[in-house]
Structures are given as C-alpha cells and as structure tokens.
Amino acid sequence: MATTTILFHYGAFQPLWQQQGLIQAGPQITDRSNGISLPNPRVEALILALQHRGLSKKGVLLHYTDPFLLRSAPLRGLKEWSGPRLLACGDLHHGPQPVDSLVDYLSTEFHDSVMLTFNPALIDEVSRRVSIPVRALPPTFFRYPKAIPNTNSQRLELLHVGTLGPHHPSRRELVTALHSRERVPFRHATTNNAEEAAELYAQHALVVNVPLNHDLNHRFFEVMAAGVPQVMFGDKGLVGHHRALAERPDVFWASSIEELEGLVLNLFAEPEKLKSIPVNPPNYWELKELLKAALAP
C-alpha cells in the first residue's frame, strides 16, 4: 500500500495547503474526492478510511490542532497509528492556561514531536514542559492567497483587519484609540476568508498587525503574500529565534500607540518610497523538508 502524509485538521478542505503526497482529513471535510471525511476525531476512524482507499497507516500523521480543540474535541487513539506522529499546535493564546492544555493532552496521547505553528517565542517554555522535541518552523504547511497591489491606486491609509470581540481586548483598545485620536488615516475592517483579506490588503499601502499573547499569527504571513508592508504592534521577541523575520524591510515594529503613529506618519510622508519597499512572499516549506526538520531527533 502507498505511504503518504495525512494532515488531520478540523476545518474545511484547504486547496492552498495541498502538496504532493498530502491527504487532508477531518470532520469538516465534505468533498471526499479531495480529502477524507471523518465522523469523529478518532484515529481508528481514520485508519478505516485509509484502508478503504488502499492506503497505509504507516505514513506520517500531521495533526493540526489548538488548545481550544484539545479541550473540546481532541483527537484520540494515537497509539493505533503505526507511523510518525507530529502535532502541529497553533493559537497558544486561546483560553485559560493554553500551554497546560497542550501538555496535558500530550501526557495521554503520545506524539513523536511538536511543531508550534505561530508561537516561536514560546518554544523554550514548551520544550521545558514536554519530553519530546519541540520546534517552530513558520509558516509550516500553510500557504496564503497572492495579491498584486496596484501602487497607483493604493489607499494611503493604515489598515487593520480582524475581529474585535471579547477575546481580543488589546486589538479593540488599539483600534478604538486610533479612531478617536485621528492622528493617522486609519481603517478597520473584517473579512470572511483569506482571499478577501488578501484583496483588501493589496488596496492599502500599509497594514497594522496586532498579535495576541506571543502569537505571531496568520496575518503576519497573509500580508506578506499580498505584497504589502506591515507594522507589527508588539515586540520583536515574537519571532523567537527567527530573527530574519523581524529584520525584513517590509516589516516595521511599534510597541506603543505614539510610536505607531509617528512611524506611520513618517512612512506616509514619502508615499512613493513606502510603495516601492520590496515585499517578498513567505518562505514556504516543501512538505518533505518540513517533516524532516520537524521530526529530527
């Protein structure tokens, strides 16, 4: 039987994540021609589905989850899997004591390695608390929609994209302050999907990104893929050991609203210079190299 990599996750099928040798599986995948639909998050159900397709359970199980899902609907039965088991954990800002949730889960469901998808700053803390290798290899298996900014029509406005609900008080505080102070041209928006967000980014000359609790987050790479410079509202320590990410010419940093406003006003004072900043796409991993780095002893 063929050996492959199974990416188990809880979302819908993601075309941009597909690479050769990868099969997506999970409860929300409804298109059986493009993935494996599972009635519940159990490895036994996954193995049965693979057997029906003539596939082996000796491939790599790439298990993508987060602390909320580890508490509410964890994948069970990992001991039944015969091949390497790699847990990719995101959103370590979710819920009370998210690192505790990860550690507790790993104590009952063994994996060979852990990959922090967007929390490279937490790698030392997690490594101290688990007995298996822990690595941060952003942006892991993710891919983001491309966009082509039209520098002739880009809006000279600072754009923020994202929800401002009860779980995002720091974002809401910053957005509210930027609106009320009116010192920089500013726009806040929400979007329904990554494709819509990419098009919106491309319409603006500069984006502000507000990470939460040491979480580098998807938007950091979404904005890069859309070809637009961004300001990270936070500390460069968010990138952990990946210092090159903090030193990119299209990534600026501010840790206070005054610093943010001053930076934006300086950049907007020379719009042609701002719009000519090179924005390279994220450094994507090929699946084989990602697994090799993540599962190394």
Image (cartoon, helix red, strand yellow):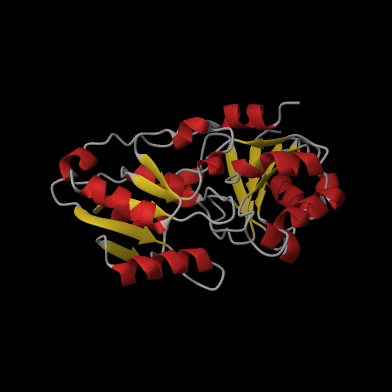
Q: Position of residue 40 (x, y in %)?
A: 72, 62
Q: Position of residue 165 (x, y in %)?
A: 50, 72
Judge by depth and name the residue closer to the eye, 18 or 2.
Answer: 18
Q: Is residue 163 left or right of residue 46?
A: left
The residue depicted at 38 percent of the width and 68 percent of the height is: 177
Q: Position of residue 216 (x, y in %)?
A: 53, 47
The residue depicted at 38 percent of the width and 43 percent of the height is: 252
Judge by depth and name the residue closer to the eye, 10 or 67.
Answer: 67
Residue pushed farthest front? 258
Q: Position of residue 71 (x, y in %)?
A: 74, 63
Quadrant of the image containing the C terminus: top right
Q: Quadrant of the rendered structure where residue 212 is?
A: bottom right
The residue depicted at 34 percent of the width and 52 percent of the height is: 207
The residue depicted at 53 percent of the width and 34 percent of the height is: 20
Judge whether residue 86 can be spotted in this image: no
Judge whether residue 128 can be spotted in this image: yes
